[in-house]
Amino acid sequence: MLHHMELSTVKRDEMRDITREVSALVKESSVQNGTVLIYCPHTTAGIAINENADPDVKRDVLMRLDEVFPWEHPKYHHAEGNTASHLKSITCGPSQQIIIAEGKLLLGRWQGIYFCEFDGPRNREYYVKIMQG
């Protein structure tokens, strides 16, 4: 089952928790054992799994990504001026795969799934593919 999902981001850099949405799709699917693939088709955004209990973790991650990949750098040549967002997206990655066990996502106690925006605000999309087996 392939699901097309949409969201709107409000900041240039943000990590949007999409765990509930993905969990709901898994529950609706009635797949008891398998995998779910969450895929982002954008070159300036990505999908990550990380802690979702303490909001300071998101803040710290975005802060360090900005330090490693500053928005402006004298050696950047990309005409659109968003090289940093491409570098962050490469670092984050475009997808995550999670095991489904007994009808639920097999995430750790503190883990959540994030849509990571690095060039917002924008209207974005991502795909959720639920697979039996």
Image (spheres, rainbow, N blue to C red):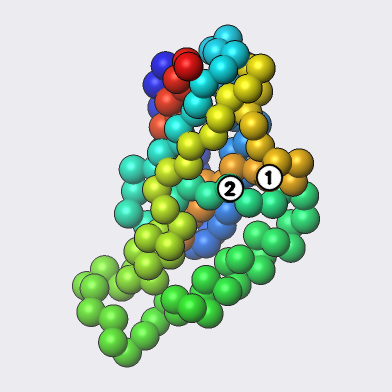
Amino acid type, mark 2? Ile
Q: How many marks?
A: 2
Q: Position of residue 29 (x, y in %)?
A: 54, 12
* Residue 119 found in image quarter: bottom left
Mark 1, secondary structure of its residue: strand
Q: Position of residue 84 (x, y in %)?
A: 39, 71
Q: Position of residue 125 (x, y in %)?
A: 41, 38
Crowd tier of the residue under label 2, counting other residues whose Cα lies within 10 Å: few below 14, some 14–19, many 20 or above: many
Residue at image mark 2: 49
- Disc sitting over residue 72 in the figure: none
Crowd tier of the residue under label 1, counting other residues whose Cα lies within 10 Å: few below 14, some 14–19, many 20 or above: some
Quarter of the image with the N terminus is: top left
Residue in view at x 44 percent, y 76 percent: 69
Q: Which residue of the protein is positioned furthest toward the bottom in this rendering? A: 74
* Residue 102 found in image quarter: top right
* Residue 8 visible in the displayed image: yes
Residue in view at x 40 percent, y 59 percent: 89
Sequence-wise, the earlier of marks 2 and 1 is 2
Q: Is residue 68 left or right of residue 73?
A: right
Amino acid type, mark 1? Gln
Q: Is residue 39 left or right of residue 43?
A: right
| Image position of 125 with respect to 89: above or below | above
Mark 2, secondary structure of its residue: strand
Residue in view at x 37 percent, y 67 percent: 87
Residue at image mark 1: 111
Residue in view at x 55 percent, y 13 percent: 31
Q: Position of residue 13 (x, y in %)?
A: 52, 62
The answer to whether the residues at label 2 and label 1 have Cβ atoms under 8 Å apart is yes
Given residues 110 and 12, the one toward you in this image is 110
